[in-house]
Image (cartoon, helix red, strand yellow):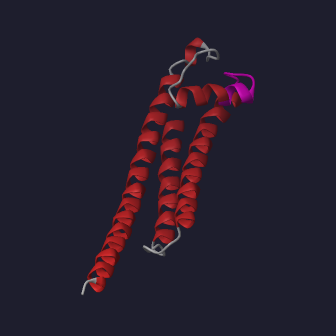
Amino acid sequence: MILIVVIFVHGAGIRAINQRFSKSWIHVSSTTPHWRLNLLLAATIASLTALHFAETLIWAIPIHVRGFIPSMRDSYYYVLESYTTLGQGNISLPDRWRLIGPIIAISGLFTFGWTGSVLVSIMTEFGKLDRARAKRQNDRALSEEADSEP
C-alpha cells in the first residue's frame, strides 16, 4: 500500500515540477542570461530532491509508528539506505518485516529512474537552447564577416 502511495506522490510531484519548469521555460529565449537559466535548473533539481526526501519520509513514518525501528531518526536512516540501495545493514527490521527493505529499494530505483527521465528531457531543452545560441553567434559572425568584405 505504501508503495502505491509513494508512486502516486512521485507522479503528482514530478508532474507539478515539470509543469512549473515548462511555464518558466516558455519565457526563455536565446538572450536569457545564463544565471537565470542556471537558477531555473537549480530550482528544478532542488524540487526533485525535495520530492525524494518526502517520499522517503512516507516510508519512514509507518516504520517508526509501527515500532519496527524505535527511533524516527533511525527509521529515516534505514529508509534512505534502502531507497538509495546503499543498504549497509547496520540498522535492520525485525525478521518478519525484512522484505520491506527490498520493496523500498525497488521504489527508489523506479522513482530515481523516473526522475532521471525528466532530467534528460529538461537537459534536452537546454541543449536546443545552446544550439540556437551557437547558431545565432555563428550567423552574426558570418554576417559581420560578409559586411567587412569589399
Q: Which quadrant of the view contains residue 95?
A: top right
Residue segment shown in magenta: 66-76
Q: Is residue 114 left or right of residue 80?
A: left
Left/right of residue 64 with respect to residue 31 in the rendered view: right
The percent coordinates of residue 106 (x first, y second) are 45, 31
Q: Residue at x 74, y 22 (%)?
A: 70
Please determine whether, in this image, residue 7 is positioned above or below residue 80: below
Viewer-closest of 61 and 66: 61
**Does residue 17 appear in the picture of this structure?**
yes
Taking 66 as reference, is 132 above or below it?
below
Residue drawn at the location 60% of the way across and 35% of the way down? 59
Is residue 148 placed above or below 70 in the rendered structure?
A: below
Residue 97 in magenta? no
Residue at the far front: name it.
150
Camera-nearest residue between 134 and 129: 134
Please give left or right for residue 57 compared with residue 99 in the image.
Answer: right
Name the residue rendered at 35%, 69% in the picture: 132
Q: Residue furthest left?
A: 150
Q: Is residue 66 visible?
A: no
| Residue 34 image point, x, y percent | 52, 65
Which residue is nearer to you in this view: 36 or 7?
36
Frontmost residue, 57 versus 5 = 57
Tell me where residue 55 appears, x and y as whole percent: 58, 42
**The residue positioned farthest toward the right in the image shown:** 71
Q: Residue furthest top?
A: 95
Q: Residue at x 36, y 72 (%)?
A: 137
Q: Please say if 97 is above or below 129.
A: above
Q: Position of residue 99 (x, y in %)?
A: 50, 20
Q: Number of marks in the image?
A: 0
Please identify the quadrant where the C terminus is shown.
bottom left
